[in-house]
Image: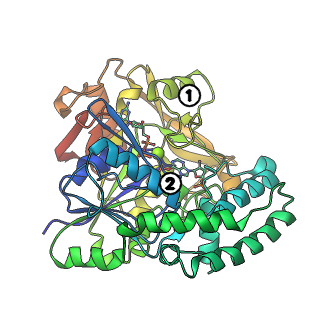
Amino acid sequence: MKKNLAVVGVQWGDEGKGKIVDILSQGYDCVARYQGGHNAGHTVNIGDRHHVLHLIPSGIFHRDVKCVIGGGVVLDPLALIEESEAIERSMSIPLEGRLFVSNRCHLILPYHRALESAIEDQLGERRIGTTSRGIGPAYEDKMGRRGLRVCDLINPETLPDKIRALVLEKNRTLEALKHPQMIDAEPICDSYAQYGQKIKSFVVDTAVLLNEIIRSGKSILFEGAQGTLLDVDHGTFPYVTSSSAAAGGAATGLGVSPKHVHQVIGISKAYTTRVGSGPFPTESLDAAGDELRTRGNEYGSTTGRPRRCGWFDGPAARYATMINALDSIAITKIDVLDTFDEIPVCVEYKYKGSVLKEFPADAAILAKVEPVYKIVRGWKKSIAGRTEWRELPAVAQDYLRFLSDYLRTPISIVSTGPGRNETIHLQTPVNFR
Ligand code: GDP
Ligand code: IMO
Ligand code: MG
């Protein structure tokens, strides 16, 4: 029986999860998203086609793979409708029978976006720099036990009154936050009732579906969004997203026992990026950072914001490796480093003159650590598109071996370009010594 696999981001998101999930999906019966919402932007390039998925799992381009949006995801129904219609157009086949949405997903409503904007405004310089999709306020309503769910959305009899009651409450909060515009419940009642009818055919109890898949001996790939350092419990709080992006989230977000998450692969860039606010010890604010951004085309897949760029952050990646107990790692975007004479890798953090033994919990401390770099020699030639380990220059192989040694984790995949085929699959993983 093939083992179920969780795919997680090791850094602050955008590691290339979309590309790797698309490639790996082929060997699985089902791909299931377990958290986050349309704050995610997962890019899949097939030939000259470029797809950015926000809600729909990155296995969707394989016609015999079932795709599940689990109850741990917060769902903006309009975003789902637009994305599913775009995919149906580009693939010329309906998604019904291939895409399944949990009846327990919490909903994002327009007041969540209004609240997020009001809260970010109030925070001023301390703002999180969110994606403005209403994600945080929707998760707040879930934890506060007042959110609306997909099972409410598809019940036209009870939906309007539930929306009206919540809008009343949210307007009180918006007023207190001095938000210039109040929310009108009626247009939301109308549009959400329509959305419910439109997405109804995708809605099932996905926990039942997934557990049946498991029982029948089939395999599931669990797709994480964001990254471990954005996880609400384990990330650089408060500069995080509001869900459990690390592997542990797969079980709670899907209603699948942790016993069924057999393996975890972590995706990491060969350097580091971050979008939004928060500490980023290895950020490069000079020409090298600009070069990484230009060469890596580091602009957000969801918001288009320029990503902050810097060197590989060893202590952060090592911490994420521990949190997820990674079985192996995929290193992406190694081709972006082709032009550098030297490649610094952060191997330690110093704080007030001493080496920190643990990844700090306090974002204020992380913001002040001094990264200690090991300088690795660059290979100075194009490795873009390489598909074999032996085609890599020895210096690039050394860089990858160094990362594997440092993280004490084998590297099983090396990505050398955005395309499906621009990938080195290591039958014998690059192993740490
Ligand atoms: P995700 O959120 O983790 O799925 O990552 P994103 O899709 O937001 O960002 C990754 C970006 O890097 C996308 O534009 C990918 O097409 C691109 N990409 C992925 N792997 C590689 C690679 O190995 N080399 C290069 N140059 N680009 C890559
Ligand atoms: P994928 O799945 C990178 C960041 C935002 C912000 C913080 C909180 O493509 O890797 P939110 O809107 O979630 O409340 O914002 O999290 N963020 C991401 N950064 N990739 C993502 O997703 C992200 N999703 C959220 O920029 O700093
Ligand atoms: Mg992304």
Determine the CA span between mark 2 and mark 1. 33 Å
Q: Secondary structure at mark 1?
A: helix
Q: Depth check: 411 or 15 in front?
A: 15
Residue 277 in sight from this viewpoint:
yes
Position above or below: 423 against 172: above
Q: Depth check: 164 or 45 in front?
A: 164
* Residue sitting at x 79%, y 47%: 125
Residue labelled with disc 1: 289
Q: Is mark 1 within 8 Å of ligand 1?
A: no
Q: Position of residue 129 (x, y in %)?
A: 67, 48
Residue labelled with disc 2: 79
Amino acid type, callout 1: Gly
Q: Quadrant of ligand 1?
A: top left
Mark nearer the viewer, 2 or 1: 2
Q: Position of residue 196 (x, y in %)?
A: 48, 68
* Residue sitting at x 51%, y 51%: 316
Q: Quadrant of the N terminus?
A: bottom left
